[in-house]
Image (cartoon, rainbow, N blue to C red):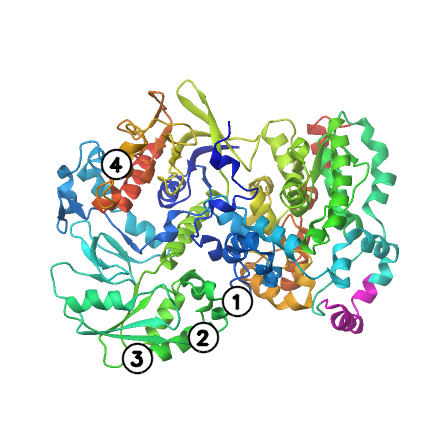
């Protein structure tokens, strides 16, 4: 089967480049080996939260020179980064997701443990504060769902009270969730979101109102709106004070929503999404990748003019570590791994870990190589790339999105 | 040399589970039935306990549809559905009931019902009979039974098609399945029509038994294994004669390719890749330029394609949709991937009927929201469920192609006399 562009990996990076290719009229396929790391998403995209040991608030794109020279951001350059990333809110909106944020100034998102962390874009219904200003509330109610264990109001209260917000903690219940509670293991955000629809939301709103009186806002765990905005809008309409959400322990409702919305947008644009399939390897002619073989499609390969590999880092199985070595399992691409196992990590758990920066090395067009030979029509994007520590920098989503958009725009010319 | 880790990996990768809970998000049962512990708990989590002591087996595993959507979603390639099915077989304490054995034994029931088809169809449609079956057997009286055909496909084939197959140079073997044989021979006729039109002869297997999916689901494992062994023998013989085996049912195909080895523990490695779906093979032949399809100009239809769960697991929906897109007059609507809820014999059972309909509800709603002439799908039980629940006719893509094909022009284009 022939395509213009074939994307290996159906997470955030793969879907974003796939959407761009399909939008440009290319015949595009995505091969996705199971669901992606988006299912762990907080509801916020980070661009750059830390540089040179300092928290970045203003003009994150001007702080790039503190990053290593080979960092993906520096290779794209700040001007082009701005052009590429300014497309993201529009794409999310096309997929049906509202977001807010600016490339010129980070805002602060509220983490589930009550910390404030810099972020670039946050989904419309999630708690985000303007940096450098007092918090906009005096009194909030932290409203959990009764017997839901993956939401920690005390941590949130600790974080908010330090910043002068009086917090009231409450748990509400509606009979619609009683049945779900029968299996104690199943009282999860995503499961609740499948029951919290239609009239159940009205009942929930009535319960929330009982504890929301006199409050400036209600903060709730993200347990609504897995398939659409409708339940969230309905709850906000039914509750007398503004309702905001904080992400929960995975699987994450905003994450699943984002994954499915982007996938659906890609399919609406005519793309082929192959779920639950694994690319086993490919055939090269000279330095070009001609076709890839998958587990499900067997002896019928996918042929393409261009390929993008967005298989993630260790967590997404884009990189595999065994006792002796670290490798890229699809094509055996060249990596920046140095030394043996003892060099991969530092004993201080909180120190920047060398393995976090491991990934596929590429030329300036993000084309990886095998045994030193660049593959002319294969591009790598997202967490699979070498040369950054997303955790320390607070840069994971930005790199994922920027490299995907950069590569897609090169391919679609 | 195998590493120590490799030697300790189980058949179904259950050690690879990182407890991420992603499978639970995509389980159609969890969304409607809180009595089901969910795929993570029923699968890898529960397995750890069961390996310690079988008494940890939870009868609620019976609610699993075996749709395998958990496996498609799993980022770590854990065969969650296989773990659950294997546990039901290994630890299930109740023997299959009379009703379950009847629903599972499609060959015996089908043979009998075909012999008296008009009476059986009439009787099964009567409200009093349905009420009795509901009360005595536990087959839900809301369920519409598929009609039985008085002419079995095999009988039709031997009489009408077999004599003319020798003239073809190449042949495929057709595993028609119980549904085509006892209920809907037209699909088999359509398959023969399409393959003959492009110059490929059709043979039947020496002996064909039910693929076994219903017996596996109802834990009649001994019978399923016996049937599977007969099928594998026939498939080996056909493959030995140079005939690949084609199916028009995604579930039968999936069962023979994957459930035989994963659940029944039969070795089918030698023939697995020779067992394929008709749409996949037809697509391959067209794509490689080996055959041409010429379609009628007066065919106009707006059709929505539903990917059956086992088709999603096979990963071959793309072949059916790509073929349908080749039909110039066909306006193809893609439906969201969603289980229809019937899961073979599951939706016939009184205790599951309401869950079955609740699971399929979003799919039915989407189908009814589109202005469609019909729905296409590769699975017969999805067909029953969607027809009963939406009132729209449902066809196999092969039947659609047969209907849209300009047979004479296609024969000419492929040099068939």
In this rendering, does residue B158 appear at all?
yes
In this rendering, the label closer to the viewer, 1 or 3: 1
Measured in 3D between alpha carbons, the distance from the residue under mark 2 to the one under mark 4, in whole angstroms, is 51 Å
Say which chain tag 4 marks.
Answer: A
Give the secondary structure at mark 3.
helix
Circles 4 and 1 in contact, beta carbons < 8 Å: no
Q: Position of residue A302 (x, y in %)?
A: 50, 32
Give the secondary structure at mark 2.
helix
Measured in 3D between alpha carbons, the distance from the residue under mark 4 to the one under mark 3, in whole angstroms, is 48 Å
In this rendering, the label closer to the viewer, 2 or 3: 3
In the image, B170 versus A222, the foreground residue is: A222
User: Is residue A68 found left or right of B258 in the rendered image?
Assistant: left
| Residue B34, numbered label | 1
Circles 2 and 3 in contact, beta carbons < 8 Å: no
Q: Which residues are magenta?
A: B121-139
Q: Which residue is mark 3?
A: A211
Mark sitting earlier along the chain (2/3): 2
| Residue A354, numbered label | 4
Q: Residues within 10 Å of mark 2 (few under 14, many from 20)?
A: few
Q: Residue at x 81, y 31 (%)?
A: B165
Q: Is residue B327 above or below residue A367?
A: below
Measured in 3D between alpha carbons, the distance from the residue under mark 2 to the one under mark 3, in whole angstroms, is 20 Å
In the image, A203 versus B266, the foreground residue is: B266
In this rendering, the label closer to the viewer, 2 or 1: 1
**Are callouts 2 and 3 both on one chain?**
yes
Give the secondary structure at mark 4.
helix
Give the secondary structure at mark 1.
loop
Most common secondary structure along the magenta stretch: helix
Q: Which residue is mark 2?
A: A199
Q: Is residue B18 magenta?
A: no
User: Is residue A13 found left or right of A137 in the rendered image?
Assistant: right
């Amino acid at each position: 089967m022939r395509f213009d562009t074939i994307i290996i990996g159906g997470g955030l990076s793969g879907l974003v480049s796939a959407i761009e290719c399909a939008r440009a009229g290319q015949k595009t396929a995505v091969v996705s080996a199971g669901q992606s790391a988006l299912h762990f998403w907080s509801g916020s995209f980070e661009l750059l939260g830390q540089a040179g040991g300092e928290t970045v608030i203003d003009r994150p794109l001007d702080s790039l020179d503190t990053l290593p020279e080979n960092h993906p951001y520096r290779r794209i350059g700040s001007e082009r980064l701005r052009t590429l990333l300014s497309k993201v809110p529009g794409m999310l909106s096309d997929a049906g997701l509202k977001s807010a944020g600016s490339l010129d100034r980070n805002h602060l998102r509220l983490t589930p443990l009550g910390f404030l962390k810099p972020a670039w874009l946050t989904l419309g219904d999630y708690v985000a504060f303007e940096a450098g200003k007092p918090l906009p509330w005096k009194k909030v109610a932290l409203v959990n769902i009764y017997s839901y264990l993956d939401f920690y109001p005390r941590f949130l209260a600790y974080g908010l009270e330090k910043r002068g917000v009086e917090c009231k903690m409450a748990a509400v219940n509606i009979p619609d969730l009683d049945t779900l509670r029968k299996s104690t293991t199943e009282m999860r955000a995503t499961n609740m979101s499948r029951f919290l629809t239609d009239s159940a939301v009205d009942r929930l709103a009535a319960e929330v109102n009982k504890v929301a009186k006199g409050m400036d806002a209600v903060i709730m765990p993200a347990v609504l709106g897995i398939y659409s905005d409708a339940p969230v809008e309905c709850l906000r309409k039914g509750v007398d004070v503004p309702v905001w959400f904080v992400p929960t322990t995975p699987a994450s409702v905003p994450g699943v929503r984002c994954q499915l919305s982007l996938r659906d947008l890609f399919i609406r644009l005519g793309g082929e999404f192959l779920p639950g399939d694994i690319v086993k390897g490919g055939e090269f002619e000279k330095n070009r990748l001609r076709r890839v073989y998958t587990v499900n499609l067997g002896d019928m390969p996918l042929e393409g003019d261009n390929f993008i590999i967005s298989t993630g880092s260790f967590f997404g199985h884009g990189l595999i570590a065994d006792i002796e070595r670290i490798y890229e399992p699809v094509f055996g691409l060249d990596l920046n791994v140095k030394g043996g196992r003892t060099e991969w990590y530092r004993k201080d758990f909180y120190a920047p870990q060398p393995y976090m920066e491991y990934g596929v090395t590429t030329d300036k067009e993000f084309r990886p190589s095998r045994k030193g030979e660049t593959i002319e029509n294969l591009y790598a994007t997202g967490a699979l790339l070498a040369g950054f520590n997303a955790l320390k920098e607070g840069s994971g989503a930005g790199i994922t999105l920027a490299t995907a958009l950069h590569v897609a725009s090169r391919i679609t010319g | 040399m195998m590493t120590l880790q490799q030697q300790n990996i189980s058949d179904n990768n259950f050690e690879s589970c990182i407890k991420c809970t992603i499978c639970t998000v995509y389980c159609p049962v969890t969304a409607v039935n809180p009595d089901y512990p969910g795929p993570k708990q029923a699968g890898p989590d529960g397995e750890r306990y069961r390996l310690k002591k079988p008494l940890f087996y939870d009868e609620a595993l019976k609610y699993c549809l075996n749709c395998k959507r958990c496996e498609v979603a799993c980022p770590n390639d854990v065969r969650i559905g296989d773990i659950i099915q294997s546990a039901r077989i290994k630890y299930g304490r109740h023997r299959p009931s009379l009703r379950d054995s009847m629903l599972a034994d499609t060959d015996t029931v089908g043979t009998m019902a075909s012999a008296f088809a008009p009476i059986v169809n009439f009787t099964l449609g009567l409200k009093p009979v349905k009420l009795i079956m509901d009360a005595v057997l536990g087959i839900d009286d809301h369920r519409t039974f598929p009609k039985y055909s008085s002419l079995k496909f095999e009988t039709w084939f031997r009489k009408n098609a077999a004599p003319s197959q020798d003239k073809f140079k190449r042949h495929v073997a057709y595993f028609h399945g119980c549904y085509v044989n006892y209920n809907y021979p037209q699909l088999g006729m359509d398959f023969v029509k399409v393959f003959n039109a492009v110059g490929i002869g059709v043979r039947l297997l020496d002996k064909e038994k039910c693929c076994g999916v219903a017996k596996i689901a109802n834990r009649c494992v001994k019978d399923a294994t016996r049937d599977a062994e007969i099928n594998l023998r026939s498939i080996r013989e056909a493959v030995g004669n140079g005939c690949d085996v084609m199916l028009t049912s995604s579930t039968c195909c999936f069962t023979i390719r994957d459930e035989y080895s994963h659940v029944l523990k039969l070795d089918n490695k030698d023939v697995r890749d020779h067992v394929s779906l008709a749409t996949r093979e037809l697509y391959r032949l067209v794509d490689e330029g080996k055959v041409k399809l010429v379609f009628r100009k007066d065919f106009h239809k707006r059709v929505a394609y539903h990917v059956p769960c086992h088709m999603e697991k096979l990963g071959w929906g793309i072949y059916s949709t790509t073929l349908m897109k080749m039909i110039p007059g066909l306006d193809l609507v893609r439906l969201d991937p969603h289980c229809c809820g019937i899961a073979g014999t599951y939706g016939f059972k009184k205790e599951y009927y309401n869950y079955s309909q609740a699971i399929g509800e979003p799919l039915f709603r989407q189908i009814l929201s589109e202005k469609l002439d019909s729905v296409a799908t590769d699975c017969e039980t999805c067909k029953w469920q969607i027809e009963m629940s939406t009132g729209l006719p449902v066809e196999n893509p092969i039947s659609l192609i047969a209907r849209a094909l300009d047979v004479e022009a296609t024969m000419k284009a492929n040099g068939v006399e």
